[in-house]
Amino acid sequence: MRTATAIWANDLRTVVRDRTVGGLLVVPLVFLVLLRIGVPLLERRLPAAGDHHAELLGLFCVIVGMFPAFMTALLMVDERDQGLVSAFRVLPVSPARFLGARLAMAGLLGLLYPLLLMSASGLGSYGAGRALVLAALCAAGGAAALLVAVSLAKNKIECLTAFKALFVLAAIGVTGALGDFSGVNTVPGVLPAYWVFGAFAAGGTGEFLSASAVAALLYGIVVGIFHRLFRRNFF
């Protein structure tokens, strides 16, 4: 635990010093204002928007759940560019613990941000248990995105490009809340985010649990595949 705390403290100092990356820490608060104030204003001009609170809230939660992973990925790729990874190999910290500490930090913030939006945005009413599951799925999306981006990117520019693509893919998953899993709507069903949005829009408990389980399974598959690639390409 002491090792993880040291890694987290160092990462936070690095993020705060970098204004570009550090600015992402407050973006969820901007999103909260948009949801709390902007959506009611939008509904005055476009009343139909009131029927899509789940989709709007889900979209912002999925995105902010990936923000901490995005910041962490940029830090890790920058460390690799500076040749610091070779120094990590001689530290008394195994690669697994190092990665675990980074994923834990990204996951914790990726959990708290969606919970903040769900509890304070005024869009929808989720019980504590359901909100926690939804936030955990959003955080899992961030962890999976981190492994994908760092495994594939050779530098910070490629990492940024990878996350742009991942943000777009996550947003495409909103179709999971807009219709049944049939016809053309089955195509984006391969995306874990599709089922996360389905969980946000689910009415009954069974439907919610089914969508959440499929999302967790797909995220697990992505993590399993790219964890091996990450260890081979990063360490």
Image: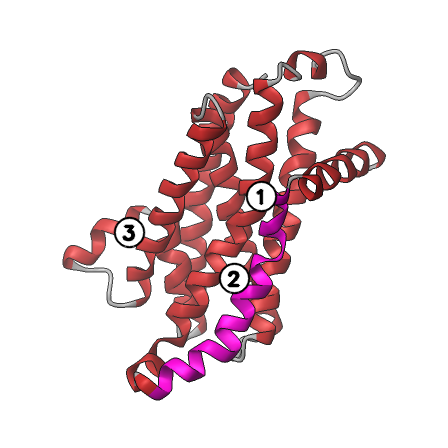
Alpha carbon distance from label 2 to label 3: 18 Å
Q: Nearer the viewer, residue 124 or 30?
A: 30
Q: Give, as a single range, the part of the protein colored magenta.
A: 19-44
Q: Residues within 10 Å of mark 3 (few under 14, many from 20)?
A: some
Q: Position of residue 229 (x, y in %)?
A: 47, 22
Q: Horizontal placement of 97 versus 50: left or right? A: right
Q: Which residue is mark 2?
A: 134
**Quadrant of the image occupied by residue 72:** top right
Sequence order check, earlier mark of 3 and 1? 1
Sequence order check, earlier mark of 2 and 1? 1
Determine the secondary structure under disc 3: helix
Q: Residue at x 34, y 47 (%)?
A: 169
Identify residue type, mark 2: Leu
For marks 3 and 1, give the one nearer the viewer: 1
Sequence order check, earlier mark of 2 and 3? 2
Tell me the quadrant of the picture where the N terminus can be found: top right
